[in-house]
Amino acid sequence: MMATNSSAESYMRPFILRAEREAQMVSAFARLAVIAIAMTIFIVAGGIHLPVAPVVLTYLISYALVSVVSAIFSLKRFFNPWMSLFFTAIDGISLALLIGFALRITGSPMSLHGAVPGFVFIFSILILSTMRYTIGPTVVVFVSFTATWILFSNILGNGGLPSNSNPDFFFGTVQNAARWGFLGIATVLCLLAVTRRRKTLEDAILAANKSANLSRYLPDRIADVVAKQGIDALTSGKQQNATVMFVDIRGFTGISEQLAPAELSALLSEFRSIISVEVNAHSGIIDKFIGDAVMAIFGVPDGQTNGELNGISCALSILDKMKSFNDHRRLALQPEIHVTVGVHCGEVFAGAVGTENRMEFTVLGDTVNIAARLQEAAKTTKSGLVVSQNLLDTSGCFPADSQNWRALSENSIRGRVGRVSLYEYAQ
């Protein structure tokens, strides 16, 4: 599981990095737009004549410069995700200093910081920080702003300057215009944030829909690979170890003669459902249904190391589920259904094969042929399950669980010169 999570993180990292870089670019241009709006409001409303005009203009110009630098560092060759923390820290620190110097210049008590129009701008900065895809920038904005304000007010404060402030400094025409301007800016940024979130949601829905459509024709795990990496990830294929299992209904021809077509269809549907559930529960993939037979594979496509044990566990679970299935069939006075299972592991070619118009994912190789022959050999056993010694050894069932397996005296496989040591499940 840890390896799977690590693989998923490695796959997602470039996409998240690209989204972070895009967010920094959007944030930089949003900053510039905010500065343009704020500067316009300040000049039109007559703020240029206020005592704090030098402080405000210095703040706006420096903020614009930071925005330009932020845009430069959002370029691919310069981008580093940690830079977002640096820029958001500057946002918080510079705003706190703006408020502090404005109060100091006018001789106003530091306790009135909430009445300074610029204080409202902290909400716009917080909204900008939420356009990122981590919580770090938002936390940094709050901490940098708060820490700077506490240090400024306690170390510098009013410095003993006489208080010459008046209500107009806080609630004059310029200040109220600034408040409304900051409110408008915050609204625009909220709309931008919502638009970006909606775009992200739409992309996620499209990706999920694409994966769902693929799942109608491919196993879920394979569909995920195609959705993320493209069909080329399958058509190229690869050599890897896998566990292959074949399951077949004993005497299906005779059973089909006793049932009407509708009953036969229902039986096959129930049988396939049982196999599918167990294969999925054991991290396997249904390769194909062939009439009353099923081919399943384990350890593909991610090459998980416990595919052998999953294959054996799945086969045993299928035998157990078929017993319960037959209990219900007996109560319904229906013929019992017994299966034969063959499981083997080894090297296979895993990938998409077929023509340009029709392709399917499968595994090929001697391992597949042996597993099919083991299923045939299982027809002569009581339990109906035959596996190879290689599978038992690789899965760790030998010697820990050797008492449940009995060696077959006949270990030749039809159509194959080499011999394979076979074991049947001893119920």
Image (spheres, helix red, strand yellow):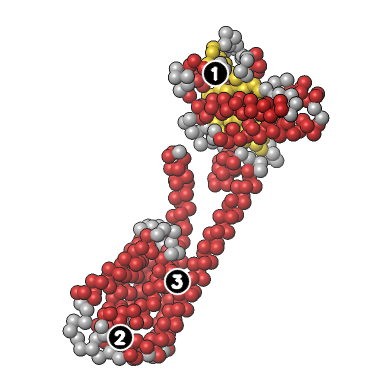
Q: Do tag 2 and tag 3 residues touch (Cβ < 8 Å)?
A: no
13 vs 383, nearest the viewer: 383
Q: Residue furthest top?
A: 409
3 or 1: tag closer to the N-terminus: 3
The crowd level at tag 3 (other Cα within 10 Å; few <14, some 14-19, many 20+) is some
The crowd level at tag 1 (other Cα within 10 Å; few <14, some 14-19, many 20+) is many
Q: Secondary structure at mark 3?
A: helix
Q: Nearer the viewer, mark 2 or mark 3?
A: 2
1 or 2: tag closer to the N-terminus: 2
**Percent x, y for residue 236?**
57, 37
Q: Quadrant of the C terminus?
A: top right
Q: Which residue is mark 2?
A: 52
**Percent x, y for residue 45?**
41, 89
Q: Which residue is mark 3?
A: 30
**Percent x, y for residue 355?**
68, 37
Q: Nearer the viewer, mark 1 or mark 2?
A: 1
Spatial CA distance of label 3 from label 1 is 65 Å
Q: Quadrant of the N terminus?
A: top left
Reply above or below: 402 against 358. Answer: above
Reply above or below: 151 against 335. Answer: below
Q: Secondary structure at mark 2?
A: loop
Q: Quadrant of residue 293?
A: top right
**Percent x, y for residue 161?**
19, 86
- Residue drawn at x 49%, y 74% as measured from the top left: 188
Q: Which residue is mark 1?
A: 388
Q: Amino acid at mark 3?
A: Ala
Q: Do tag 3 and tag 1 residues touch (Cβ < 8 Å)?
A: no
